Image (cartoon, rainbow, N blue to C red):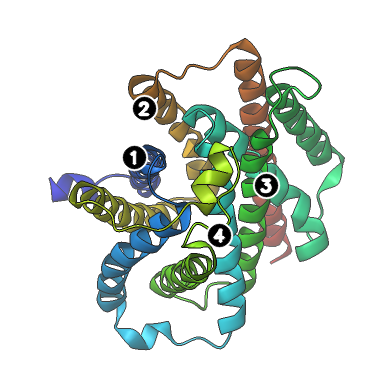
Amino acid sequence: MRNRLTSLNPNTLGILCLVGALGSLTISDSIIKWVSDDMPLHQITFWRSCFAMLAVMLIVRLEGGLARLKTERPLLHLLRGSMLVLANMFFFVGLAAMPLAETVVLFYTAPLFICMLSQPLLGEKVGLRRWFVIVVGMLGAIVMLRPGSDLFRMVSLLPIMAALCYAAMTMMTRKLGIRESGGALTFYIQVAFLLISSAIGLVTGDGKFDNYDNPSLHFLLRAWYWPSFIQFQLLLICGLIVACGGYLMSQAYRLGEAPIVAPFEYASLPFALIVGYYLWGDWPDWPAFVGTGLIISSGLLVMYLENRDRKKARLQAHIAG
């Protein structure tokens, strides 16, 4: 079996790793949605990160030990981790009150935000075509949100806020560059999760702010309590899955070429549709499918344009060299 895997094309291996990561993370999201009826988000995040850290430390050891965690930019690591913590919180608070597939699709506006932020933050040229694609993708989000109708819910904006925070985190990842190991990047993310979830737990853990008749706010502010044995098992599975999924994600882009691997990010949508339908009976209506098509099409087109520009730049560099 191992010989068969090593004989595969690197891009094929990268795609397999990415699909495995997305399947794992969909299971993790489903576990969090499942326990969201009883446990507060900050408590779930805390225990998940504790269990994930066990797997992360194993990865760090395999990469060369604690020396690999040394960094000259701890504040940037912490800020990057904080953006991912916010992205998770917005996503999961929305997920507590929304269907899994709809939440995932609205989060897919992240590539569009990444494209928008790359010019002011990284000085990368966006261009008229990319702005057109961004507008199309945002129209897809508007179709799904349906502002002005009876179906519009403010909670639907939360996955989009999650996408914006995720895009900011991606910009910081580019700033950190290739000098940091994958283990270090994963380690400091989990440190940020532990610090922030602990701080929120200290402030809101007694439930004194849980005075709202809203499932999302109730999920965020309800009192901390000791999980049952089954809940501990679920959180353990969730933490290990998150660590393994993050590692598979990094392997996917390490082994394969990003422009070839990245379009398979959308494989999480069928996973989310299947899990959401069988566990909660959720199925999107036709406006949601139209919005989904616009968001995914624009995201794929952004990836295509970036791939084309990279090839053009490599060709020009080869001619000039």
Between residues 172 and 206, which one lies in front from this camera angle?
206
Name the amino acid, label 2.
Val
Residue at far left of view: 1
Left or right, residue 192 beside residue 313 = left
Place residue 212 in its image quadrant: top right
Give percent across and percent down for residue 267: 44, 33
Q: Are marks 2 and 1 in contact (CB under 8 Å)?
A: yes
Q: Are marks 3 and 4 in contact (CB under 8 Å)?
A: no
Q: Earlier in the sequence, mark 3 or mark 4?
A: 4
Mark 3 to mark 4 CA distance (whole Å) = 11 Å
Residue 161, numbered circle: 3
Name the amino acid, label 3.
Met
Mark 4 to mark 1 CA distance (whole Å) = 19 Å
User: For the point 77% across and 49% down, which residue is it?
Assistant: 116
User: For the point 43% across and 24% down, which residue is it?
Assistant: 273
Could you tell me which secondary element the residue under label 3 belongs to? helix
User: For the point 65% across and 44% down, which residue is it?
Assistant: 111
Q: Earlier in the sequence, mark 4 or mark 1?
A: 1
Could you tell me which secondary element the residue under label 2 belongs to? helix
Q: Are marks 1 and 3 in contact (CB under 8 Å)?
A: no
Residue count near mark 2 (Cα–Cα under 10 Å), binned few <14, some 14–19, many ≥20:
some
Give percent across and percent down for residue 51: 29, 63
For label 1, the residue is 27
For label 2, the residue is 275
For label 4, the residue is 84
Mark 4 to mark 2 CA distance (whole Å) = 24 Å
Could you tell me which secondary element the residue under label 4 belongs to? helix
Quadrant location, the N terminus? top left
Mark 1 to mark 3 CA distance (whole Å) = 22 Å
Residue count near mark 4 (Cα–Cα under 10 Å), binned few <14, some 14–19, many ≥20:
many
Between residues 137 and 43, which one lies in front from this camera angle?
43
Residue count near mark 1 (Cα–Cα under 10 Å), binned few <14, some 14–19, many ≥20:
some
